Every structure is written in C-alpha cells, then in structure tokens.
Image: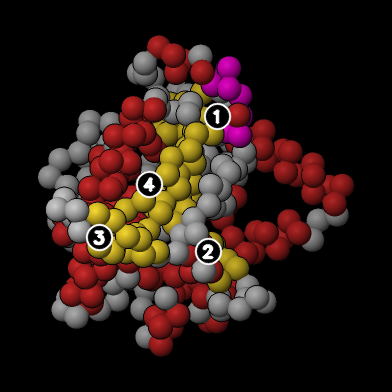
Amino acid sequence: MPELMNEPLQIVTEADYQLPPLPEKRKRRFGDRYDGYRVRKMDLPFYIIPNIMRSRLDSQIFFEETIDITALERYVREKRATDMPELRLMHVVLAAVVRMFAQRPRLNRFVAGKKIYAHNNIRASMTVKRSLTDDGEETEIMPIFSPYDTLKDVTTRFNNEWKAAVAEETKDDNVTDNVIRAIGFIPTWLKSFVVFVLRNLDKVGLMPKIIYKASPFHSSFYITDVGSLGIDSIFHHLYEFGTTSCFIALGKKKTEQFFDEEGNLRRRKVLTFRFVLDERICDGHYYASSIKQFRHYMKHPERLELPPEELPDEI
C-alpha cells in the first residue's frame, strides 16, 4: 500500500461513521475485566480445559485454507474504478475477518488466569513498516472495528490508522512505540521483573490500561501479510503474553492449474491463509464452520458492502 502515502493525511473520527445502533452496553459484573467479560455459560469441557492446557502454546491448532481469488481481484478492480478508489485486497480480507468475528462471537474469547473471557470489542493488530526497506522501522496499528462495519467502514478505519502510524508528523505520538521505548531503557535485570509483574497483573485483569492500549498482543486477532515480502503464508505461533487467541497469515498470490467440470485444464489465481488458534476457547467444529464462513465472504465480497442484518445474542 505505499501508494496511499501520496494522499493527504485525513483522520476520520467516530462521529463520521453512520452505523446502526449497537446493543445496549453490557453491565460489568463481579469477575469481569475492563477489557473483557467472564464467559459463564459454556459447554462442560471448557470449564476444565484451561486447567489442563495451561498455556496458549500448549493449545495451538492449525488450519490452512486456499481460496480462489480470481473473481475477488476483478471485484476489487471494479470497486476501485467506481466508488472505493482506495480499496485493496487486504481490506476485503480484514472485512471478512471482522464479519466472521461478529457473527461467530466465540472466536473473540481468550483465556486469562485459567478463566475464559470474551473481548469487549473487535480489535485487530498488524505490524507495518514505515518504509519498505531492510532498515525501515516497524510499528503497530490496532484498529477497533464495530460488528456492524461494512467493507467501506473497514477500509476507512484501516487506512486512517495506517496513515497515522507511518506519517512523520505523528511518529512521536505512537503510544506503542513510546511504551516500548520506555521499557527498553530499563536495565535488563529490572526489565525482566517489570514484565513478570505485568504478566501476573494481566492474569487477573489489573494490568495498567496504558499497557493495554499500547499492546498489540491484547487483540481479537493478529493478522500479517507476509505475501508483501514475496513469500508464502506461514503458521505463526500465538503469543503467551496478552489475550490474542487467533493469528492469521496470508502469503503471496499464486497461479495454479486445475481441471474444470468438463475436464479442461485451466488456470486460476489463489491465496493461501494459515490460521493458528487457541483450542481452549471453542471446539474444532466451531472453528471449521467459522473458516467456511470466511471463505464464503472472500468469494462473495459484495455481501460485505452491507452491515449484518442480525447478530448473535452474545454480541
């Protein structure tokens, strides 16, 4: 997306979005966290699974999904030529993931202190470079999406976060960079103690909010586009620190040959997605059904142009 840098920096505020009204805000109850609420109704095995599989690394499961994007690329070109000139394939991927999380809310759960919680919002994390060079500085963007967001909403939110993150005039205002820089100046022996304290505070939901605001590890999902580096997608591990239970990687576009229904050899453009997920928050059937829904939206992106007509009660 380097070409976006040629456009003026325009930060869009929440007031600029015309969204349907959200459900009434959930009242905080005893045992809830400021960044999530305690899930109290689950299938029986999930009451004990966090005690058996005690870490995120112990609970990782892996899904791979290869999707034909021939029609999707045509859709993106058509939309860019009409009403969405900034649209990129990555925006469609993000919008499909956001819609998947909105309609499959168990994906938005996490385990902390051997208890299962649900995030209060749909927050994405992504690492971006300020310049596409070996020495280009990396920074994090963490846009928060509404479950009612359309493709256009997701595109606008992401672009504003991205532009603000890489712009020179906002470089010194990046909360994530400033927190990392501050911790980085602490002596090594003290740094380990500080991280130890933060880990344990996070387990009980008492970690300082400034750390939560700056942390890309406290999100609904982490997504990385390694295809922009010219390599295929990877299975990226989950982070033990934080609350992120889903890591999604997409690789470079590839052309493959296939036989159609009449036996003719044809070519198509495909993109491989690799998901790494925490098994403790929902079962394999729920995950598989969710990824099928993601695939459906990637094949029918026009359905992301409108907000969902209804959402599950858990939202």
127 vs 72, left or right, is: right
Q: Amino acid at mark 3?
A: Leu
**Above-or-below relation of 16 to 237:** below
Upstream in sequence: badge 1 or badge 4: 1
**Which residue is denoted by mark 1 in the rendering?**
59
Task: Give the residues drawn in magenta, as a range.
Answer: 50-57
Q: Amino acid at mark 1?
A: Ser
**Which residue is denoted by mark 3 in the rendering?**
265
Kindly state the secondary structure of the residue where label 2 is placed: loop
Kindly state the secondary structure of the residue where label 3 is placed: strand
Residue at the spot 50% in from the left edge and 59% down from the top edge: 232
Location of residue 194 (image quadrant): top right
Q: Nearer the viewer, mark 3 or mark 2?
A: 3
Q: Nearer the viewer, mark 4 or mark 3?
A: 3
The x, y position of residue 256, in whole percent, is 35, 61
Q: Nearer the viewer, residue 46 or 253?
A: 253
Residue at the spot 39% in from the left edge and 38% down from the top edge: 108
Upstream in sequence: badge 4 or badge 3: 4
- Check contact, mark 3 vs mark 2: CB within 8 A: no
How crowded is the residue under tag 2: few (<14 C-alpha within 10 Å), some, or many (20+)?
few
Q: Amino acid at mark 2?
A: Ile
29 vs 153, left or right, is: right
